[in-house]
Amino acid sequence: MTLIKSLRSWMLVIVLVVAGSGLFQSCKVSYSFTGASLSPLVKTFTVYYFPNRARLINPNLSQQLTDGLQDKLLRQTSLDLVEERGDLEFEGQITGYDTRPMNISQGDQAAQTRLTVTVRVKYTNNLNHDEDWEKTFTAYEDYDARRILSEVEDELVEAILEKLTEDIFNASIANW
């Protein structure tokens, strides 16, 4: 019996020494099922308004992009939204909103038209400036060239903004 008690005591000592040495320390990055990988020190984010500097202007696009990115971050992280100076900051501008003919068919007629949105984003991690970046993101949707843009614009913009916010999220929070 004393041998078993002695072995248990030694096992306990070994476990305590190993735990104290840092081998069982938790990771400095937390992961979630949404793909977000953040330091546990990161608690807040700020998404500043994205002004529209494109040649063609969709009057709702700036607000939709800003709101869409905020919603994505709120849904897929445990971070809190703050008006300014968040641990993570997103700012930028819409630099392109263009249509162009695609898939030329018989008689030099376009079969489809492509709506493309381009956004310049500056991401700042105020807790780790090594992760800061500035990038340009572009997304597009095609539609039947026999239709006019105003007929399909709302659904196209919704799909494009979903792609853009996903790409921005992946580049910043998911570190892809």
Image (spheres, rainbow, N blue to C red):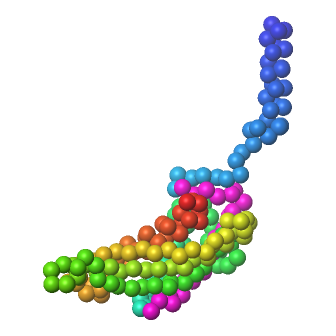
Where residue 48 sits, quadrant-wise, is: bottom right
Q: Residue furthest left?
A: 106
- Predominant SS along the magenta part: loop
Q: Is residue 52 left or right of residue 20?
A: left
Residue 29 in the image: state x and y as whole percent.
Answer: 67, 53
Front residue of 94/25: it is 94
Judging depth in this view, the residue of 77 and 172 nearest the camera is 172
Question: What is the quadrant of the C terminus in the image?
Answer: bottom right
Determine if residue 164 is in view: yes
Which quadrant would residue 116 be assigned to in this image?
Answer: bottom left
Q: Foreground: 66 or 74?
A: 66
Q: Is residue 14 above or below residue 121?
A: above
Tell me, yes or no, whether the highlighted magenta stretch contains residue 41: yes
User: Is 62 drawn above or below residue 41 in the view shown?
Assistant: below
Indicate the quadrant where residue 14 lies: top right
The answer to if 164 sits in the magenta stretch is no
Residue at 46% x, 75% y is 138
How many dots with numbers?
Answer: 0
Q: Which residues are magenta?
A: 35-55
Residue 154 seen in this snapshot: no
Residue 21 drawn at (x, y percent): 83, 37
Residue visible at 57% across and 53% down? 32
Residue at 38% x, 75% y: name it: 140
Instruction: Establish if 104 lies above or below 6.
Output: below
Q: Nearer the viewer, residue 134 or 66?
A: 134
Residue drawn at 53 percent across, 63 percent down? 170
Q: Position of residue 42 (x, y in %)?
A: 69, 62
Classify 18 as above or below 103.
above
Q: Quadrant of the N terminus?
A: top right
